[in-house]
Amino acid sequence: MDYNHITKQKHLFTPGSTKKCQSQNKPTKPENEKQKVNTKAASTAVKPKPFVIPTSSKIHSDVQSQCSSVHSVRSFATPKPLKTTCTIKAPSSLKKKNDQTNSKIKNETEKELIKSQEVEIRNKDHTIAEYTKQIEEFKQTIAQLEKEVKEVRQNNLNHLDRQFSQITIEDLELQQDQIETVVQNGDNYLINQMNNKIYELEKQCQKLEQEVTDKQLALRSVEEIITIRDSLCQDLQLKLTKAETDLEETIQRLEMVKGHHALALEANESIRREYKVELETLKSKLEEEKQTIINKSKSDQENLKSNYKSLIESIKNQMLKEKDEALQELQHELISKDNEMKAKIEQINEATREKLRLCEIQFEERTRSIQDDCTQQQIKIEYLENEARDLKYKITIISEEKMSLQKEMNSLKVENESLNKEKQILIEERDELKEDAKKRLIDFENEKNKLTVEVDKAIKDKNKFETSLSVTRDIVEVLTMRLRESDNELEHLEDKIQTLMNTKEILENELENYKTTLNNTAMECNEYKEALVNILKSKAALAKEHNRIMEHNVSLIESLQNVEKEAYRELGTIKNELIEDVELLKKESNSQIQLLREEVEKKRKLCELATEHAGQATVAAEQSRVLLAQAAAEINRLETENQCLQQQIQDQQSLVVELSLLRQENEELTMTVAKQSSIIDKMKKDSEQLQYKPKSPSVLRKASKIGKENLQTIISPLRERNH
């Protein structure tokens, strides 16, 4: 195991292996650059999303405010006397222009919405293609890494076998230096690789954090849109209060005008009956339209709720199934890998034990030869000691012959000293041999400890490599999940486009119907205006009718007061009904928004539970992103529905105002028709009198002058009313 790691590092730092590593490490930079470019493109493609729909909503709100202001001005302006044909035709042209501008603005906003959604679809297709390319590249890199790992393991085993066959104890010191250098270089290389991987993972985490911040900003923008909608509702309420004040002012004006109604005649009962029938038909139509709109909205809401509930349940079941399957697969893979690694570790341990036994046998053989030399030297030393004892014994015997043998004794002393020196030298050599043996044992133990440390390092590196492989697999799974989610989003967008096209057709049909009704009303107004012109032309005999008009004035004022009271009651009831409908719609929209927020919170809780079970923060973040996008889409859809309902309410209010105007015009027409009938009767009487009594032209001129003066007196209160 120890030598396996050392030889593996040697193989990595051979020239061929370094080239391979360089060739493998070089393409990582462009891949990282590609990933950066892809992330930038995705971010740029996704950023314009939340800012497309609010612009259209703002445009709609501006158009609605303009339309409402126009209707309010028209409703409370007093009618002016119609003198010429050019003044009569001006309002119809203004109506047509306003309708054309409103229709153009609506068409432009719808086209902008369709274009923005098409751009979003293209961007998502582009991101999907880039994700598929990245997945294929990751798969290729994983396959290459697995092949390289297998090749490196086989080469390392062969190299180890060769080295163990060539190892000798004399080369150990040289190999130790080489091993230390190789280990240092290998550790540095592995540290650099792991630092690069850590840096890449940190980049990915930063990207995910940026995506989370972007989604938070999108949520804030949606909340701001909701606040804007609430402010618009408040503005509408203020406009309603202003309208009420204007109604009160008009009531006061009508009371002032009642004193000036001196030229009122009996209204035709047939016209009143027709007017009542028309009012009843309009009321019935309005009620039917209200009921149909309410039923449609309720049915749509129920269908949407059921669809969303079924979708959420199916998504939950799919997620649980996928999680269980993934966990089972991972557990099986972990068990198989653990068994393989245990078998490999046992084989390596057995090989190292056998090699250590061989080393110990060689060491014992070398130490035996050294011990034999030491025993021989000890025998020599004992022999010399015995000889010294014999010599001492001889010296004691020959003590008497000392004087004669002093020279011999001196020579013997010199020899004895030399022998003692040799003895000390031999003792020192024996001590040195013992110390060398101890040092060698210590070195072997140190080497053994170093090899065990390197084995631990190799195991740690193996675990790190396995973690990196698991991280890459998780990334691949995350990318596949993103692809699935993007496919679902595309389908959802296609459904939305179809619904928008259907709504567009419905709105176009409604616009055509409204245009036809407006054209019919314009034709009727033109007919009434022509009748007024014809009435104004007949001005001759109004002076004689003054006394008769004053007699019938009181009865007509009473009848008009009764009619006005009935009209005000009807207007009050219609107004209260409309206000109640508006409040109900607001409450329903607020309740729907609250329900959606609660659903969003529930989905967030489900996402948190999924993160706790799976242990993968990236998958949970993406799931929450998808759920938030769906919630934002639902909120936008509900806002569009609310805007449509508000438009319908405003249209109904404008219809009510137009009805009030038509009532006023009908009243004026009844007055003018009555006057015309009375004038015709008098003209007939005058013609009969003239047939019996012809008059001079001077008398006729006087009569025409008197008629003109009476006409001026009749028109003067109307002018005061308009001023």
Image (cartoon, rainbow, N blue to C red):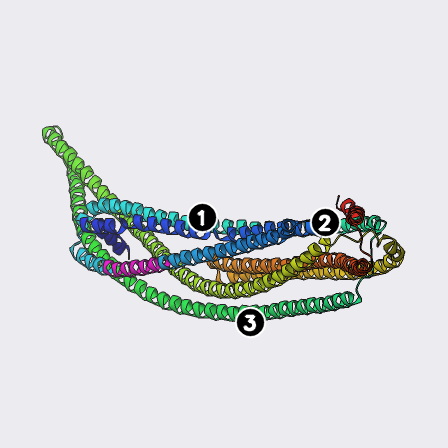
The residue located at (36%, 59%) in the rendering is 129
Q: Which span of residues is magenta-colored?
A: 131-152
Q: Which mark is residue 206?
A: 1
**Residue at disc 3, secondary structure:** helix
Q: Mark 3 belongs to which amino acid?
A: Ser
Q: Nearer the viewer, residue 676 or 64?
A: 676
Please tell me which residue is depicted at 56% across the width and 57% down the height of the picture: 636
Secondary structure of residue under mark 2: loop
Q: Which residue is mark 2?
A: 81
Q: Amino acid at mark 2?
A: Pro
| Cα distance in 3D space between marks 1 and 3 | 35 Å
Magenta span: helix, strand or loop, mainly?
Answer: helix
Left or right of 112? Residue 128 is left
Q: Between 718 and 18, which is closer to the camera in this rendering?
A: 718
Looking at the figure, which quarter contains the C terminus?
top right
Residue 594 visible, this orientation: no
**In the rendered structure, are the residues bearing label 3 and label 2 in contact, judged by CB atoms less than 8 Å apart?**
no
The quarter of the displayed image where residue 465 is located:
bottom left
